[in-house]
Amino acid sequence: MLAALDLILGLLFQDWQLASMVLPIASLFFLSNIWGLPEKVQLAISHQIVPSDSFGDEDISVNIRVSNRNSDPLGNVEVDEHLPSEIKVESGASRVLTQLGPRDHVELALTFHSPIRGHYWVGPLVARVQDPLGFYLAENIVEPEILSIMPKPERIRGAELRPRHLGPWPGTIPARTLGPGTMFYSLRDYVSGDDPKRINWKSSARHGRLIVNEMEAERVTDVMIVLDTDVSYYETAEAELFERGVRAAASMASFLLRQGNRVGVILQGEKRGVVPPAFGKRHERNILFLLAGAKPGRASLSTSYVITLLTRLMLPAKAQIVIISPLLDATILGGVRELAGAGYSILVLSPSPKAPAIFESEIEEIAYRMLMLERSNTLLALEKICTVAQWSAGVPLSTILAGVRRQRLVIRV
């Protein structure tokens, strides 16, 4: 518009020098309108993360599709997929220049190794189209999508819960009443309609009449898993301690849900989150999604206050609570004592901190030993209230929980 105005003024006032200066610019605009972009650029773009949820043991692909819905070709198309700094592309490219014919499309792909546990925003995906002279630009943007690298649950065997509260649904927890189950409960005389498979032939032969086995009913329960993310004690060893706690929470949740229990999770620390108790595979994914975003840090609200408040809101009385904590905050003892007094069955699973190989100063070593002494006192106090299991580094979680089984997880008040 300004070039056209200058040209008109030059011709009007017969200023040929002004007119000659404007002519090249006007010519460029004229040519860009002839060979430039269509009047309306119709560019469709999409991207898909495969898989969008992962346990970190596979490569991740981002599949991109760019379509030209115009009947004119597009000769200068730039496709740019924004990636977080933690992701390093192994094959393909996050930024590509290409061309599209009329009604044509192009499919692009980039692959990278799975990053560590966490949530990552892949995108936005931006496609830009310019004319050859660079005067006109059309842009299309697709919002970012989230890639979740979740903690992989460890396969647990041999663990049992024995809470006081049981739901009405069949499961794996002995209910101390007659009903369908796998554990022997008592004997009684045979009555018409009993399943012949339940006849105890040895007892029948001894008493001279038919005797059948009565089985102990097995039910499910409500469980709340509390993950305490406060691992602030020695910087070089915090990551291992924290990841062990996250993995334990994921493993316990997966194990208890497979048994048919109703399970919820409280993430307590600098980053907080709650998944209310529910059933099923989809619910397991919701729990693992929450744990994928867990980060270590000290909470602004005390763990004691949070667990007593949320547990009472979301769990029925006498249900089961599993607290996974390194027990570096002694105030947790008050919350456990209050919940135990209310009748809840409590298991405290405590990943044990590893002693640093080298201390930077004598003061640092003294501070560490004082913290471990305070933790030992907390453990001794908790053992008088509930079931406590210490989990040392390098020991499988199943081994620890198999030892808990022999204690039957019965609350001691």
Image: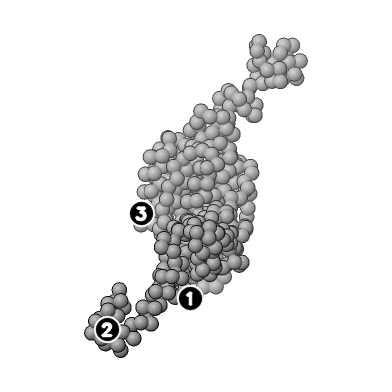
Q: Is residue 371 above or below residue 310?
A: below
Residue 85 at what x, y percent from top left?
50, 68
Q: Is residue 144 left or right of residue 305?
A: right
Amino acid found under the numbered disc labelled 2: Gly
**Secondary-structure class at tag 2:** helix
Residue in the foreground of this view, choosing between 327 and 10: 10
Residue 219 numbered tag: none
- SS assignment at label 3: loop
**Is tag 3's residue or tag 1's residue first in the polypeptide sequence?**
3
Question: Which mark is in front, 3 or 1?
Answer: 3
Image coordinates for residue 306, horizontal then vertical, percent: 38, 48
Cα gap from disc 2 to disc 3, whole angstroms: 75 Å
Which residue is found at the position 62% from the left and 55% from the top?
395
Left or right relative to 237: residue 304: left
Residue 392 vs residue 251, the one in the foreground? 251
In the image, is 280 to the left or to the right of 143? right
Against 307, residue 6 (above or below) is below
Asked if the residues shown at circle 2 and circle 3 are in contact, with their CB atoms under 8 angstroms apart, the answer is: no
Q: Residue under label 1, please give it.
A: 361
Disc 2 designates what residue? 10
Residue occupied by mark 3: 301
Give the camera-side residue of 43 and 17: 17
Where is 280 relative to 229, above or below?
Answer: above
- Say which residue appears at 54% left-offset and 33% top-offset: 220
In the rendered view, would you say 365 is above or below 389? below
Closer to the N terminus: mark 2 or mark 1? 2
For label 2, the crowd category at 10 Å Cα-Cα, with few meaning under 14, some 14 to 19 and many 20 or more, is some
Q: CA distance from mark 3 to mark 1?
A: 31 Å
Q: Amino acid at mark 3?
A: Leu
